[in-house]
Image (cartoon, grey):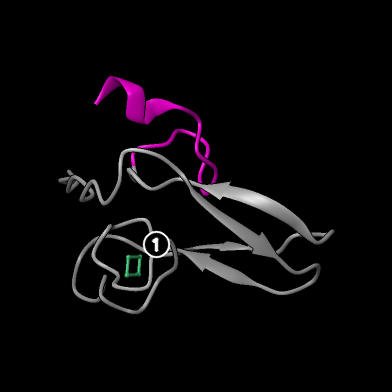
Amino acid sequence: MSEIMEEPIIVKKGPYEVEVEAGKTYYWCSCGKSEKQPFCDGAHSGSGFQPVPFTPEISDTIFFCGCKHTKAPPYCDGTDKDL
Ligand code: FES
């Protein structure tokens, strides 16, 4: 069985800086179609993409990937520099 991987949309070349709350679950958009970046709004429906759940243990500032090509979702890993 072969699987065709769609490419995610590059929303932003750079991270989204977001203050997150400990114990709350966030859903990072992996497809790039959401209008509520960097989080999922359900726009991935019908594509091969699924949001990535993220529940921080401490309240913190997180740099969420905006280019959707990170190798360490949901975090920005600097991959945007090579796109
Ligand atoms: S809208 Fe992009 S993963 Fe849900």
Q: Residues within 10 Å of mark 1 (few under 14, many from 20)?
A: many
Q: Amino acid at mark 1?
A: Cys
Residue shown at 24%/76% (left/top)?
A: 45
Measuring from the top left, give residue 39's x and y in whole percent: 44, 67
In front here: 48 or 68?
68
Magenta run includes residue 71: yes
The image quarter in which residue 70 lies? top left
Read off the magenta span.
Answer: 69-83
Is residue 73 shown left or right of residue 21? left
Measuring from the top left, give residue 59's x and y in whole percent: 80, 61
Residue shown at 69%/52% (left/top)?
A: 61
Q: Is mark 1 within 8 Å of ligand 1?
A: yes
Is residue 19 shown left or right of residue 1? right
Measuring from the top left, give residue 35's x and y in whole percent: 29, 73
Q: Main secondary structure of the magenta part?
A: loop
The image quarter in which residue 23 lies? bottom right
